[in-house]
Amino acid sequence: MKNIMSICVVVALVLSAGHVRAAEVDDIVAKANEAMYYQAGDGRADVKMTVTDSLGRTRERGMTILRKDTGVDGKQKYYVYFHQPDDVRGMTYLVWKNVGTDDDRWLYLPALDLVRRVAASDKRSSFVGTNFAYEDISGRGTEEDGHTLLGEENGMYKIKSVPKDPGSVEFSYFITWVDMNDFIPRKAEYYDKNGTLYKTIEALEVKDVGGFPTVVKMKATDFNAGSNTVSEFSDVKYDLGTDENIFSERFLRRPPRQYIDKQ
């Protein structure tokens, strides 16, 4: 009887440790998501994206990104206005980020005067020809993956995330390194269905902006294509009191100049 009770105690301790571990990693992932996508109640930034192909040729895209938290269940809205190159000037991209269900996305093409709904199945597609995916701009829902804490390395939490719906994405899992001090994700590695590393996203520079640690330079690398995209953020501002009404289809054709033009 004594042996049986000892075994029960050991099993209980193991299960308890497992629950604590799961709660710990979910807490880390939640804090990392908050640090990366939910700083303050709203914000803006000018972004220069430089795409370098496998032959070393480069092309640039310039845009302004606006973000507004709705204050309801983690929902957010994003508005992206393209300044350059000339063939995409005036193009706008709108995201209504939902939690627990698919985001809503629209793209306005001024050359065609056409608003196109971006299908949820396109969330892992290239964002306007760069090495970032549409989903990378507004962030992937933390509830879409199961997370495991693999350990700690050089002041970073190392976390493995496996999609709960493998058929909806091109990767089998990804590993993220999260800074233990500010919870900013510093690097993510994506592995394909064969377990081969094919893409990385790195935070190359983090600065304090108004008291918020903010990624101001990041890089996405596609090892299969031999290309990469470097995004540089400038004129980053928070708590602008942005009018939520601008995050609507009506403003895709009428960009809100008071937020887009340099202050």
Image: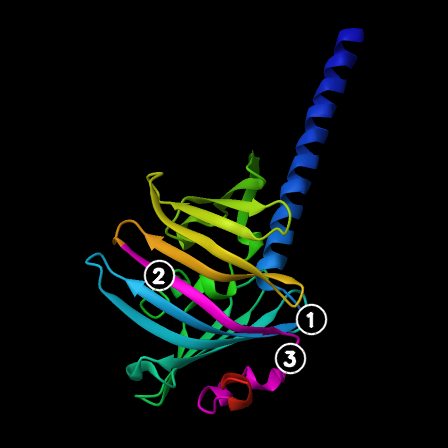
Residue position for label 3:
240
In percent of width and height, residue 193 lies at: 35, 43
State how far apart marks 2 and 3 are (Cα): 28 Å
Q: Quick one: label 3, few (<14), some, or many (20+) residues within 10 Å?
A: few
Residue position for label 2:
229
Residue type at the position of mark 2: Thr
Residue type at the position of mark 3: Leu
Q: Is residue 210 above or below residue 225?
A: below
**Which circle marks residue 71 in the picture?**
1
State how far apart marks 2 and 1 are (Cα): 32 Å
Q: Indicate the colouring scheme.
A: rainbow
**Count of labels shown?**
3
Q: Which of the 4 quarters of the picture holds residue 85? A: bottom left
In percent of width and height, residue 236 lies at: 55, 72
Q: Which of the 4 quarters of the picture holds residue 68? A: bottom right
State how far apart marks 1 and 3 are (Cα): 15 Å
Whether pointer 2 and pointer 3 mark residues with C-beta atoms closer than 8 Å, the reply is no
Q: Is residue 197 magenta?
A: no
User: Is 155 left or right of 84, judged from the image as shown?
Assistant: right
Residue 73 shows in the view = yes
Q: Is residue 230 magenta?
A: yes
Residue 68 shows in the view = no
Residues drawn in magenta: 227-255
